[in-house]
C-alpha cells in the first residue's frame, strides 16, 4: 500500500521544477535522463535513415533515392548511431545514473564536468544535425582519405567538428567514471565487491580516455588536410592514406568495446538478479572486462588486411585479434554457468539478457571468421562484416541497453512498465533482428559488397528478407518507446526493490532522493549476495 | 568437399581453400552456438523460478571449468589463425610465371591492360589455368578489386602499386566489384571477369587487336616524352641507362641501395628526386600531371622489357 | 582513501638545482645536434629529452611524492603511446619485405 | 576548479578534503594522459614520415633557427621553474609570493608565444607555409618538405594553443589568489594548473629536438 507520506516523499525528480532545474542540474541522475532523451532522439534519427536504406534495397536498381542520397543515408546512419547513440548509450545514461549509486556515492566525482559532457554531446550533435540538414555527408562513417579530404563535396567538416566535440563528451565521461570508481567508493566497497556493471564501465572508461584523443587528433588532421591541403594523407605530396586508417582504427576498434563492454556489465547484473545467484566466476568476469579493454587496443590492424598494410603486420594483428576472443568467451560461459541451479525468472530484463547472450555468441563467433586472414580477404567490406558488427552492436549493445532500461526503469522513474507488452517487445525485437541481419551473413559470403546502392539481381531475395526483418524490428523498437512514456503516468508505482536485487541502488527508495542515500551505506558483503534480500518483503511487479 | 548453397562459385585455386576454412569455422560456430543456446534453454526451463521466495544455493565458480573454457577456445583459435595466415601468405606471393595484367581504378571504372596491348574497361578476359598477377593503382581515391568467385580482394590505393593474384579453375563469367567505398557511383564500379579456354583467349586476344603491345606503347611514350634524350642505352646521357635496370639493386646518392621494382620505377617517374642514383644529378623534371597512371604503367612495362626476361617475369617475387 | 596528503614541500634549492639541470641538458642537446653521430643523433636527442621529461615530472610535477596510482596513470599513458607508435611502425617498417608491392 | 567563497571548499559529493584533493589530482593526471594520446597521433605521423623521408626532413628541419628554438626552450623551462615556485609558495601559504611567481610565469609564457609568433611569421615570409604558395629551396621534393612544415605547424600550433589556454588559466589563478581563495590548506587549483603547465612544457621538451635538432649535422 502506498501511504500519503510516501507519495509526497521528496526525490530527485520532484525536489525542484522548471527547465532551469534540469538544464543546470549537477545531479548525475538528472543528467542521465538528459542523456537518455538526447540519445533516444539520435537513435530514432539513425533508425529513420536505416529504414530508408532498407526500403531502398528492396529492389536491385533502387529508385527511391539517388546514389548520392543513398550514400548520405548510410553515412548519416553510421554517424548518428555510433557517435551519438551507441558510444554514449549505456555509460552515459545507465552508467551515469547507477554507477555512483552502485558504489554508494552521492554523485560522480565531478558533477559539473558531467553536465559539461552532456552539453558537449548536444553541441556536437547540433553540428552533426546541421550537416545532415544542410545537405548531408557522404564519406561513410569511416571518413577514409583521400575521399573525405579531397573528393567529397559534402559537409565533411561540419560532421567532423560534431564528432570531435562529441569525442570530448566521451573523454570527460570516462575521466569522471575512473576518478569516481577510484575515489568515491562507500566504506567497505572494496574492488572485489564492486558490481560487475561498475567493473565494465571502469574498463570502458579506460578506453574512452586512452582512445578518443587519437580520434580527435585524426579529425584535426583531416580538417587541416581539407582546408589547407597539408599533405599528410595525400599521396600526391608523398603522404599515405593508409596512415589515416591506422589512426582511425586505433580509436574505432576499441570504440567497439566502448559500445559492448557496458552491455556485458548490464548482462552480468541481469543474469545474476534474475537467477538469484552470484555471477559464476566473478573474478574472471571482472578481469575479462579489463583484458578486453587492454587487448582491444592491440588489434586495430585487422581492419587493414587488404589495405596494402604489410603482410607481417597483418599476421601480427590477426594473431592478437584471437586473444580478444578468449575473455569474451569466458564471459559467455560464465553467464551460462550462472544459470545452473539458479532460480530463473522470465521477467522482461532476463528475456533481453537471454537474447543478448544468444546474439552476442553469434556475433562473437563470426568475429573469428573476420579475424582469420584467409576468410577476411573474401568477406571484408561485404555484408558479412555488416552483419557481424550489427550482431555485436544491435544484437549485443541495444539488447543489453533495453534490458538494462527495463531493469532500472522502476528505480529511475518510480513506475513499473507493463510487463506483458515488454515481454512481447523483447520477442519481436529478437525475431526481427535475426530476420534482418542473418540473411546479411549469407549475402556477404556470396560477395555482396557493402555500401552498394544498386546490386546484382541474384541478391534480391536475401535483401527482401532483410528488409522484412527490419520492419519487424522497427515495430519492436517503437513498442518500448510508447509503453515507457505511457508508464510515466499510468504505470504501477514501483517499490524500492521490485526484483529482489542485492545492489546498493535498490536499498534506497524509487525514485531515489537527491543525494541517493539518506546516509552513506556501509558495505559488508560481496556483490550478488541474495541471502539477505529474499527474506525481506518482495512486492511482485 | 563441394560447394554449399550459400557460397559463391569456386572459380580459382584459392576458392576451395577459403571455403574449407569456412566450413571448419562454421562447424566450430554451430557447435558452440548450439551448446550455449541448448544450455541456456535447458537451465531456463529446468531451474525456472517456482516460488517468489526461492533462494538457490550460492556457488562461486570453479577453477577447473574456467581453465577448461579458456584453454579449449584458445587452442581452436590458434588453429584458425594458422590456417587463415597460411592462405593469406599464399595469396600474397604470386608465382614467378604469372601472367601480368595492369589495373587502374578511377571513379568509377576499372581500366585493365594486357601485356599484348589489349585494353578493357570493366571487363577482364583471362585464360583458364594460368596464374594471373594484377598490378594495380588508382588515379583518385581508394578502390578495392574484388572477385567473389576467386575469393580475392585487394585495395587499390592512389600513389602506390598493390598486387593480387589468382589462378582461375573454371571458365565462365564472374562478378567483379569495387569493394572499398569510393564515392557517388561506387555501386556502378562493377564489371565481369571472363575466364576462357586458353585457345579462346588467344583468339580473343588476336581478334580486334588494336595496336602495339604494352611495352611498345610504353616505348613510344618514352620517345614522345623525350625521355630518351637523357636516358641513353649506352649510358652516354645525363641520366642513367635503363637497360637491365628492372630487378637490379640501384646505388643511391647519399648511400644505400634500392631494388628497382615497379614501385621504384613509378616513383622515379613521378617524383624523380625522391631517390637520386649515385653519380647523377637531380636534373630530371617531374612527370606528375603530364602522364596518366596508365601511361606510367606503360613506361614501367617498357623499362621492364629492357631487362632480361627471367627477372621481368619474376616480377619481384622473391 | 587513507593515504595522507600533507604537502611534502621541497626546498627551493632542489628546484633551483633541477632547473639548472634542465638548462644544462638543453645546452647539451643543442650542442650535440651539430655533431655527426649518424643514427645515434636521434637516440641522443630523445634520450636527453626523456631525461628532461623525467626531471620535470619527478620534481616539478611531484611524481616522486605522488601515490602509486598517479605513477601508474603516467606509466600507462606512455605505454599506450608506445602501443600506438610501435604497432603502426610495425606495418610501415615491414612493408615491401616480401618484395610484392602493396604487401 | 573551485570558486567557493566559503573558506571550506569541500563539495557536497565528497566526504573529506583529502578525498576531494586526491580526486582532483587523479582527474588532472588522467586528463594529461588524454593529452599525451592527442599529441601522440601527431608524433606518430612525424615518426612515419621522418623514417620515409629522412633527408628531406633533415634539410627542412635545418632551415629552422636552432638558436631561437633553444632560447625559447630555456624561456619555457624558466616558466616551469617559476610555476613550481608558485606552487611551493602556495604550499607554504605565502600569498604574495604566489602572485609574483604566477606573474613571472605569465610573462615568460607570453615571451614564448611572442617568439613563436616571430618564427611563424618568418615561415610566411619564406613561403614555408603549407598550401598553394609553398616553396622550399633546399630539397627537390616539395611534397615531403611540405609534410614536414605541415607537421611543424600542426605540432607547434597545437602546443601554442595549449599555451594560450595555460595563460588564461594563469590569469584566472592570479585573480583568485588576489581574492584570497588559496591557502596552505586549500590550493588544489594552483597545483592542478601547475601540472598542466609542466605538461605543456614536457611536450615542448620533445618538440624541440624532433623539429629543430635531429640530423641537423646533415645540413649541406
Image (tube, grey):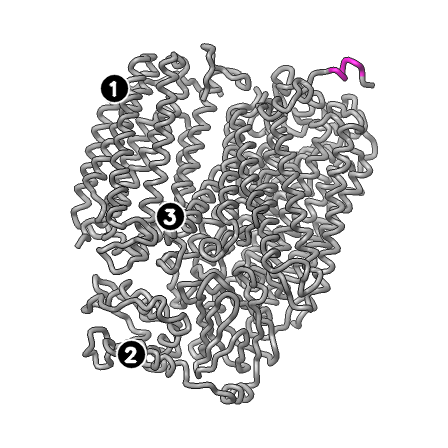
Same chain for mark 2 and mark 1? The answer is no
Residue at figure coordinates x 77%, y 45% from the top left: A427
Assign a secondary structure to mark 3. Answer: helix
- Residue A341 in sight in this render: no
Residue indicated by mark 1? C12
Number of dots carrying numbers: 3
Residue at figure coordinates x 56%, y 59% from the top left: A381
Assign a secondary structure to mark 2. Answer: loop
Q: Is residue D215 left or right of residue A60?
A: left
Question: In the rendering, at what x and y percent does residue C93 appear?
Answer: 36, 57
Question: In the rendering, at what x and y percent does residue A313 appear?
Answer: 44, 57
For label 2, the crowd category at 10 Å Cα-Cα, with few meaning under 14, some 14 to 19 and many 20 or more, is: some
Assign a secondary structure to mark 1. Answer: helix
Q: Is residue D93 left or right of residue A113?
A: left
Furthest-front residue in this view: A134
**Cα distance, mark 2 to mark 1?**
71 Å
Residue indicated by mark 3? D44
Label placed on residue A323: none
Picture quadrant where residue C25 is located: top left
Which quarter of the figure is the C terminus of chain B placed in?
bottom left
Q: Chain of mark 3?
A: D
Q: Main secondary structure of the magenta part?
A: helix
Picture quadrant where residue A38 is located: top right
Question: In the rendering, at what x and y percent does residue A279 appear?
Answer: 66, 36
Residue indicated by mark 2? B244
Same chain for mark 1 and mark 3? The answer is no
Looking at the rendering, the stretch of residues picked out in magenta corresponds to: A3-8
Q: Chain of mark 1?
A: C
For label 1, the crowd category at 10 Å Cα-Cα, with few meaning under 14, some 14 to 19 and many 20 or more, is: few
Using the image, determine if residue B51 lies above or below residue B145. Answer: above
In the foreground, D88 or B15: D88
- Residue C29 in sight in this render: yes
Amino acid at each position: 500500500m502506498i501511504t500519503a507520506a510516501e507519495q509526497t516523499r521528496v526525490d530527485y525528480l520532484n525536489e525542484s521544477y522548471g527547465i532551469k532545474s534540469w538544464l543546470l542540474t549537477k545531479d548525475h541522475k538528472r543528467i542521465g535522463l538528459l542523456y537518455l532523451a538526447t540519445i533516444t532522439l539520435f537513435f530514432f534519427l539513425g533508425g529513420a535513415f536505416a529504414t530508408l536504406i532498407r526500403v531502398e534495397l528492396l529492389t536491385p536498381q533502387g529508385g527511391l533515392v539517388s546514389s548520392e542520397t543513398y550514400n548520405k543515408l548510410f553515412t548519416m546512419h553510421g554517424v548518428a548511431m555510433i557517435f551519438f547513440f551507441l558510444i554514449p548509450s549505456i555509460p552515459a545514461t545507465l552508467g551515469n545514473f547507477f554507477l555512483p549509486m552502485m558504489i554508494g556515492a552521492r554523485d560522480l566525482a565531478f558533477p559539473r564536468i558531467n553536465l559539461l559532457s552532456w552539453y558537449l554531446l548536444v553541441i556536437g550533435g547540433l553540428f552533426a544535425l546541421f550537416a545532415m540538414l544542410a545537405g548531408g555527408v557522404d564519406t561513410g562513417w569511416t571518413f577514409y582519405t583521400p575521399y573525405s579530404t579531397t573528393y567529397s563535396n559534402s559537409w565533411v567538416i561540419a560532421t567532423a567538428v560534431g564528432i570531435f566535440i562529441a569525442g570530448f563528451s566521451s573523454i570527460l565521461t570516462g575521466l569522471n567514471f575512473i576518478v569516481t570508481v577510484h575515489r568515491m567508493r562507500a566504506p567497505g566497497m572494496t574492488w572485489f565487491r564492486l558490481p560487475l556493471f561498475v567493473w565494465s564501465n571502469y574498463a570502458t572508461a579506460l578506453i574512452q580516455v586512452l582512445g578518443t584523443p587519437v580520434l580527435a587528433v585524426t579529425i584535426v588532421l583531416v580538417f587541416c588536410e581539407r582546408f589547407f591541403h597539408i599533405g599528410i594523407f595525400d599521396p600526391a605530396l608523398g603522404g599515405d592514406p593508409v596512415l589515416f586508417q591506422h589512426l582511425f582504427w586505433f580509436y574505432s576498434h576499441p570504440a567497439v568495446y566502448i559500445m559492448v563492454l557496458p552491455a556485458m556489465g548490464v548482462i552480468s547484473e541481469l543474469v545474476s538478479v534474475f537467477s538469484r545467484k552470484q555471477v559464476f566466476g566473478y573474478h574472471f568476469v571482472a578481469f575479462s572486462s579489463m583484458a578486453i579493454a587492454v587487448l582491444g587496443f592491440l588489434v586495430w590492424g585487422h581492419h587493414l588486411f587488404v589495405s596494402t598494410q604489410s603482410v607481417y603486420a597483418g599476421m601480427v594483428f590477426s594473431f592478437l585479434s584471437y586473444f580478444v576472443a578468449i575473455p569474451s568467451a569466458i564471459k559467455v560461459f560464465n553467464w551460462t554457468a550462472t544459470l545452473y541451479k539458479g532460480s530463473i525468472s522470465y521477467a522482461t530484463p532476463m528475456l533481453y539478457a537471454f537474447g543478448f547472450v544468444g546474439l552476442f555468441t553469434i556475433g562473437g563467433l563470426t568475429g573469428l571468421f573476420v579475424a582469420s586472414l584467409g576468410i577476411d580477404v573474401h568477406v571484408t567490406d561485404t555484408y558479412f562484416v555488416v552483419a557481424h558488427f550489427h550482431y555485436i552492436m544491435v544484437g549485443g549493445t541495444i539488447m543489453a541497453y533495453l534490458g538494462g532500461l527495463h531493469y532500472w526503469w522502476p528505480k529511475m522513474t518510480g513506475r513499473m512498465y507493463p510487463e506483458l507488452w515488454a515481454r512481447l517487445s523483447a520477442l519481436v525485437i529478437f525475431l526481427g533482428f535475426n530476420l534482418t541481419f542473418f540473411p546479411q551473413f549469407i549475402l556477404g559470403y556470396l560477395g555482396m559488397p557493402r555500401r552498394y546502392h544498386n546490386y546484382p539481381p541474384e541478391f534480391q531475395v536475401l535483401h527482401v528478407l532483410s528488409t522484412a526483418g527490419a520492419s519487424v524490428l522497427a515495430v519492436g523498437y517503437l513498442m518500448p518507446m510508447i509503453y515507457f512514456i505511457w508508464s510515466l503516468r499510468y504505470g504501477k508505482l514501483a517499490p524500492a526493490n521490485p526484483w529482489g536485487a542485492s545492489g546498493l541502488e535498490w536499498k534506497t527508495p524509487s525514485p531515489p532522493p537527491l543525494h541517493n542515500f539518506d546516509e552513506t551505506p556501509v558495505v559488508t558483503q560481496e556483490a550478488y549476495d541474495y541471502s539477505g534480500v529474499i527474506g525481506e518483503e518482495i512486492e511482485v511487479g | 568437399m563441394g560447394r554449399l548453397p550459400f557460397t559463391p562459385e569456386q572459380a580459382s585455386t584459392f576458392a576451395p581453400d577459403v571455403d574449407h576454412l569456412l566450413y571448419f569455422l562454421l562447424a566450430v560456430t554451430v557447435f558452440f552456438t548450439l551448446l550455449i543456446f541448448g544450455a541456456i534453454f535447458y537451465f531456463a526451463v529446468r531451474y525456472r523460478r517456482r516460488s517468489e521466495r526461492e533462494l538457490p544455493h550460492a556457488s562461486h565458480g570453479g577453477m577447473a571449468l574456467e581453465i577448461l573454457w579458456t584453454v579449449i577456445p584458445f587452442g581452436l583459435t590458434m588453429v584458425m589463425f594458422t590456417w587463415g595466415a597460411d592462405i593469406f601468405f599464399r595469396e600474397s606471393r604470386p608465382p614467378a610465371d604469372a601472367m601480368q595484367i595492369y589495373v587502374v581504378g578511377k571513379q568509377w571504372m576499372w581500366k585493365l591492360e594486357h601485356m599484348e596491348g589489349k585494353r578493357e574497361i570493366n571487363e577482364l578476359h583471362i585464360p583458364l589455368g594460368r596464374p594471373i598477377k594484377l598490378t594495380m593503382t588508382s588515379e583518385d581515391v581508394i578502390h578495392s578489386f574484388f572477385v567473389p568467385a576467386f575469393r580475392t580482394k585487394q585495395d587499390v590505393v592512389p600513389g602506390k602499386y598493390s598486387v593480387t593474384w589468382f589462378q582461375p579453375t573454371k571458365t565462365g563469367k564472374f562478378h567483379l566489384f569495387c569493394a572499398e567505398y569510393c564515392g557517388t557511383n561506387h555501386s556502378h564500379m562493377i564489371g565481369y571477369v571472363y575466364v576462357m579456354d586458353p585457345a579462346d583467349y588467344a583468339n580473343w586476344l588476336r581478334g580486334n587487336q588494336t595496336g602495339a603491345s604494352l611495352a611498345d606503347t610504353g616505348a613510344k611514350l618514352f620517345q614522345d616524352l623525350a625521355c630518351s634524350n637523357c636516358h641513353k642505352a649506352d649510358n652516354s646521357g645525363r641520366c642513367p641507362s635503363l637497360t637491365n635496370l628492372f630487378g637490379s639493386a640501384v646505388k643511391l646518392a647519399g648511400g644505400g641501395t634500392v631494388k628497382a621494382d615497379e614501385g621504384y620505377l613509378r616513383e622515379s617517374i613521378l617524383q624523380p628526386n625522391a631517390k637520386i642514383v649515385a653519380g647523377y644529378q637531380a636534373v630530371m623534371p617531374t612527370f606528375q600531371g603530364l602522364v596518366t597512371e596508365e601511361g606510367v604503367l606503360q613506361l614501367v612495362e617498357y623499362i621492364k622489357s629492357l631487362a632480361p626476361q627471367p627477372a621481368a617475369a619474376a616480377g619481384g617475387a622473391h | 582513501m587513507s593515504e595522507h596528503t600533507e604537502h611534502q614541500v621541497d626546498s627551493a634549492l632542489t628546484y633551483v638545482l633541477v632547473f639548472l639541470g634542465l638548462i644544462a641538458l638543453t645546452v647539451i642537446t643543442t650542442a650535440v645536434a651539430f655533431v655527426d653521430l649518424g643514427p645515434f643523433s636521434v637516440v641522443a636527442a630523445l634520450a636527453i629529452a626523456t631525461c628532461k621529461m623525467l626531471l620535470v615530472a619527478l620534481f616539478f610535477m611531484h611524481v616522486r611524492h605522488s601515490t602509486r596510482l598517479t605513477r601508474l596513470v603516467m606509466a600507462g599513458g606512455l605505454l599506450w603511446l608506445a602501443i600506438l607508435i610501435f604497432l603502426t611502425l610495425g606495418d610501415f617498417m615491414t612493408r615491401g619485405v616480401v618484395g610484392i608491392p602493396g604487401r | 576548479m573551485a570558486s567557493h567563497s566559503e573558506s571550506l571548499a569541500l563539495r557536497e559529493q565528497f566526504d573529506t578534503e583529502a578525498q576531494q584533493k586526491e580526486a582532483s589530482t587523479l582527474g588532472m593526471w588522467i586528463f594529461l594522459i588524454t593529452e599525451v594520446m592527442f599529441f601522440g597521433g601527431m608524433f606518430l605521423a612525424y615518426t612515419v614520415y621522418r623514417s620515409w623521408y629522412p633527408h628531406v626532413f633533415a634539410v627542412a628541419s635545418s632551415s629552422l633557427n636552432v638558436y631561437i628554438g633553444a632560447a625559447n626552450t630555456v624561456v619555457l623551462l624558466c616558466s616551469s621553474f617559476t610555476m613550481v615556485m608558485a606552487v611551493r609558495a602556495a604550499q607554504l601559504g605565502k600569498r604574495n609570493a604566489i602572485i609574483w611567481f604566477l606573474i613571472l610565469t605569465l610573462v615568460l609564457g607570453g615571451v614564448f608565444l611572442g617568439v613563436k609568433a616571430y618564427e611563424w611569421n618568418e615561415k610566411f615570409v619564406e613561403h614555408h607555409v603549407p598550401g598553394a604558395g609553398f616553396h622550399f629551396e633546399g630539397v627537390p621534393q616539395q611534397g615531403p618538405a611540405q609534410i614536414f612544415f605541415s607537421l611543424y605547424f600542426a605540432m607547434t600550433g597545437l602546443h601554442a594553443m595549449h599555451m594560450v589556454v595555460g595563460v588564461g588559466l594563469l590569469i584566472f589563478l592570479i585573480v583568485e589568489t588576489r581574492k584570497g581563495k588559496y591557502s596552505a590548506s586549500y590550493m588544489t587549483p594552483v597545483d592542478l594548473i601547475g601540472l598542466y603547465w609542466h605538461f605543456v612544457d614536457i611536450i615542448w621538451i620533445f618538440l624541440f629536438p624532433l623539429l629543430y635538432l635531429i640530423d641537423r649535422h646533415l645540413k649541406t
